[in-house]
């Protein structure tokens, strides 16, 4: 009987310890992990200014009533506006927020296409199409924040904060272009695997001369350049040219170099995560740090 009593007590102790450990584990889970995801749907938006309507995709946290958020604007490349719903970007963003890696934000991806195609369709690689891309980016940037604040989404936006701008491939030229054209509006920029036309040494780029490569002078401005070692030209040389030119003009960029993936969506998600983490924590992650983080959807 004594032996059975000891076994019973031992079982009770084991169960109590297991319950305690389980409770501690649940308490340590990131906010939202046991509930619904922070982002469940992607919406199409449109805003009007300058006599034109501009459209794109927008992600807003589900539990947004009465709250204000920073805005992160991200431009696509020549391949077209990435279909965030097709690639389940809401799941990625939810995981980043729910794991506590980044703060909830409003994520916006504008279209720069005006050739009659669906805004998720790509454009070609002719000079006229490059010019269309640059023209529409430039037209959007100057009044984008004001237009967004006047839209139905304005009540969720922290008007005191600057909009941060990132971009991938040709969109990476758009983001760094934003930091040059409107340094006071867009001090925080990320050029992710940039293509060539932002600035070329021969004067054929959107920015014509080296002295025009300027950015915010704020000591709190965050600037990031990133590239993948497996990427081909023109991305590697563009990355180096932009970094060197900016540095020679007195502007420093944080850099992230990925050892994985070529010019594809996997690299883009890694780069945009590094940018958004940098915005919130003022540090740029390494591949080694990313390997031990559960950030993939």
Image (cartoon, rainbow, N blue to C red):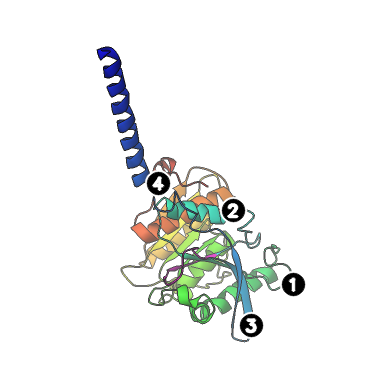
Q: Nearer the viewer, mark 3 or mark 2?
A: 2
Which tag, 1 or 3, sits closer to the chain's start? 3
Label 3 and label 2: CA atoms lie apart by 29 Å
Say whether residue 294 is left or right of residue 234: left
Which numbered disc covers residue 116?
A: 1
Please give the range of residues in magenta: 60-74
Picture coordinates of residue 282, whole percent (x, y): 34, 58
Which tag, 3 or 2, sits closer to the chain's start? 3
The residue where tag 2 is placed is 88
Q: Residue lying farthest bottom?
A: 51
Q: Nearer the viewer, mark 2 or mark 4?
A: 2
Label 4 and label 3: CA atoms lie apart by 41 Å
Mark 3 Cα-neighbour bin, 10 Å: few <14, some 14–19, many ≥20:
few
- Residue at horizontal 28 percent and vertical 13 percent from the top: 1
- Residue at horizontal 36 percent and vertical 62 percent from the top: 252
Picture coordinates of residue 229, whole percent (x, y): 51, 45
Using the image, determine if residue 87 lies above or below residue 201: above
Instruction: Between residue 253 and residue 75, name the one nearer to us.
Output: 75
Which numbered disc covers residue 52?
A: 3
Q: Element at badge 2?
A: loop
Label 2 and label 4: CA atoms lie apart by 24 Å
Query: Contact (CB < 8 A) between labels 2 and 4?
Result: no
The quarter holding residue 219 reads bottom left
The residue where tag 4 is placed is 286
């Amino acid at each position: 009987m004594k032996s059975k009593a000891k076994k019973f007590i031992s079982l009770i102790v084991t169960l109590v310890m297991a319950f305690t450990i389980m409770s501690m584990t649940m308490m340590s889970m990131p906010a939202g992990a046991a509930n619904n995801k922070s982002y469940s749907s992607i919406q199409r938006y449109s805003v009007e200014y300058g006599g034109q309507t501009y459209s794109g995709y927008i992600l807003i946290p589900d539990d947004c009533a009465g709250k204000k958020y920073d805005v992160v604007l991200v431009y696509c490349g020549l391949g077209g506006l990435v279909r965030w719903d097709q690639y389940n970007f809401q799941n990625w963003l939810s995981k980043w927020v729910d794991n506590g890696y980044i703060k909830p934000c409003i994520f916006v991806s504008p279209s720069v296409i005006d050739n009659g195609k669906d805004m998720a369709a790509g454009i070609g690689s002719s000079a006229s199409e490059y010019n269309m891309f640059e023209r529409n980016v430039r037209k959007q940037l100057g009044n984008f924040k004001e237009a967004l604040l006047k839209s139905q989404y304005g009540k969720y936006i922290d008007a005191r904060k600057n909009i941060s701008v990132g971009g991938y491939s040709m969109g990476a030229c758009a983001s760094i272009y934003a930091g040059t054209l409107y340094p006071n509006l867009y001090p925080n920029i990320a050029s992710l695997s940039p293509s060539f036309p932002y600035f070329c040494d021969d004067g054929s780029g959107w920015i014509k001369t080296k002295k025009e490569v300027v950015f915010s002078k704020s000591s709190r401005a965050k600037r990031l350049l990133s590239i993948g070692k497996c990427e081909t030209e023109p991305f590697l040389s563009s990355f180096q040219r932009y970094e060197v030119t900016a540095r020679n003009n007195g502007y420093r960029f944080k850099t992230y170099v990925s050892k994985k993936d070529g010019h594809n969506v996997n690299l883009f998600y890694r780069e945009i995560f590094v940018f958004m983490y940098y915005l919130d924590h003022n540090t740029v992650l390494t591949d080694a740090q990313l390997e031990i983080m559960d950030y993939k959807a």
